[in-house]
Image (cartoon, grey):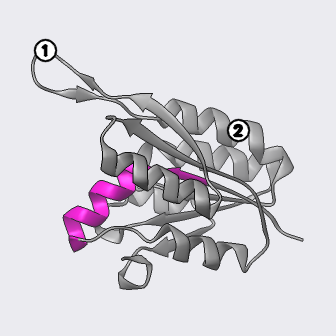
Amino acid sequence: MNRIGVFADVQNIYYTTRQVYGRQFNYRKLWQRVSGRGEIVSATAYAIDRGDEGQVKFQSALRDIGFRIRLKPFIQRSDGSAKGDWDVGIAIDVMEAAPELDTVVLLSGDGDFDLLLDRIRKQYSVSAEVYGVPSLTASSLIRAASVFHRIDDNLLL
């Protein structure tokens, strides 16, 4: 059976689907699609914790689907900018999980992950699939993926 790990860059998916489509991503539909191709042995959603009620409900919904939630605090800088991304955490988790997986599914359009996908494909012979909004997914990430899945109307609420 195909052993699958799912790694969701929640902030990236939220902002890209909102920017391009004005809608939210349907994690339940993604789960149905991916689980139809094998066994999801791990699924992690990486998010920033702002502590608002809507976010807590969303995280609860992700847990109900089957995701483990990893949170980082939202940091507001004195200049008004914000900090909070999970790139390093996602990369570490993918590298640790890859030897036990047949397929890594990454939800992100962030080109910083292209080297990660190249490495796990070569080192562990895993399939590296990316789900991203086409116009906001780095071309280097698309090239590094074994398969690129377009996020479009079929995966939106």
Q: Is residue 3 above or below residue 83?
A: below
Q: Where residue 149 sits: x, y (%)?
A: 51, 74
Q: Where residue 112 sits: x, y (%)?
A: 45, 42
Q: Which of marks 1 and 2 is nearer the N terminus?
A: 1
Label 2: state its secondary structure: helix
Please state, as top left, top right, bottom left or bottom right, where the C terminus lies in the image: bottom left
User: In the rendering, which numbered label is found on residue 95?
Assistant: 2
Q: Can residue 110 be seen in this view?
A: no
Q: Is residue 65 above or below residue 115?
A: below
**Of the residues shown, which amino acid type is indicated by label 2?**
Met
Q: In this view, does 123 lie above or below 109?
A: above
Measured in 3D between alpha carbons, the distance from the residue under mark 1 to the one under mark 2, in whole angstroms, is: 34 Å
In front: label 1 or label 2? 1
- The extreme bottom residue here reads 154
Residue in the foreground of this view, choosing between 149 and 68: 68
**Of the residues shown, which amino acid type is indicated by label 1?**
Ser
Q: Can residue 54 be seen in this view?
A: yes
Q: How many numbered marks does the figure carry?
A: 2
Magenta region: 7-22
**Main secondary structure type of the part rendered in magenta:** helix
Q: Mark 1 points at which residue?
A: 78
Q: How crowded is mark 1: few (under 14 residues within 10 Å), some or many (20 or more)?
A: few
